[in-house]
Amino acid sequence: MTRLALAMWMALRKLGYRPYHFIDRWIQNQLHLWDQALRAKYYGVGKPWKREEFDRVMGDFDVSSLYPSTTPCCIVVLTGLQVRP
C-alpha cells in the first residue's frame, strides 16, 4: 500500500466510512473473485458480473481508496458502477 493510498484509507476510516482496498481481498484470500470478473469481461469465460457478484466482492465496504491503475476492480469499474451505484 503506497503512502498516499494508506493516507486516503485512514482518512476515509476517520470520516466513518469503511474503505475498500485490494489488500483486503488478498488478506481474505479472495483474489480469485477478481480473476473471475476479468475473465468474464474480457474473455467471455463465465457469466458477466451482476450486482450479486459485485456485492460478494465488495462486501460491506462503502467507498474505495484505490487508484484506477492499481487494482483489477478499477478495470471493471464501469460495470460495477452500472450494477452497484
Image: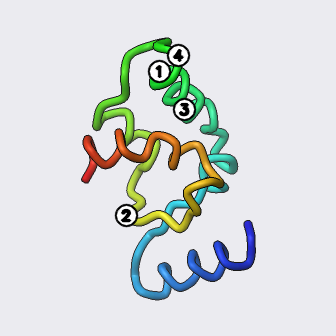
In the foreground, 61 or 71 = 71
Instruction: Name which quarter of the figure residue 56 lies in.
Output: top left
Question: Label 1 belongs to which residue?
Answer: 40
Q: Is residue 29 left or right of residue 55?
A: right
Question: Label 4 belongs to which residue?
Answer: 43
Say whether disc 2 or disc 4 marks the residue closer to the N-terminus.
4
Residue most extreme to the right: 2
Residue type at tag 4: Tyr
Q: CA distance from mark 1 to mark 3?
A: 11 Å
Residue 67 vs 40, above or below: the answer is below
Residue 33: give its label. 3
Estimate the x, y position of residue 74 in percent, counting from the top left: 51, 49
Residue 50: give its label. none
Q: Is residue 61 left or right of residue 34?
A: left
Label 1: which secondary element: helix
| Labelled pair 1, 4 in contact (Cβ < 8 Å) | yes
Question: Label 2 belongs to which residue?
Answer: 62
Q: CA distance from mark 4 to mark 3?
A: 15 Å
Estimate the x, y position of residue 24 in percent, counting from the top left: 61, 55
Q: CA distance from mark 2 to mark 4?
A: 29 Å
Residue type at tag 1: Ala
Say whether disc 1 or disc 3 marks the residue closer to the N-terminus.
3
Identify the residue at horizontal 62%, vertical 54% (top origin).
Answer: 69
Label 4: which secondary element: helix
Identify the residue at horizontal 66%, vertical 40% (top origin).
Answer: 29
Residue type at tag 3: Leu
Residue type at tag 2: Asp
Identify the residue at horizontal 35%, vertical 39% (top origin).
Answer: 79
Label 3: which secondary element: helix
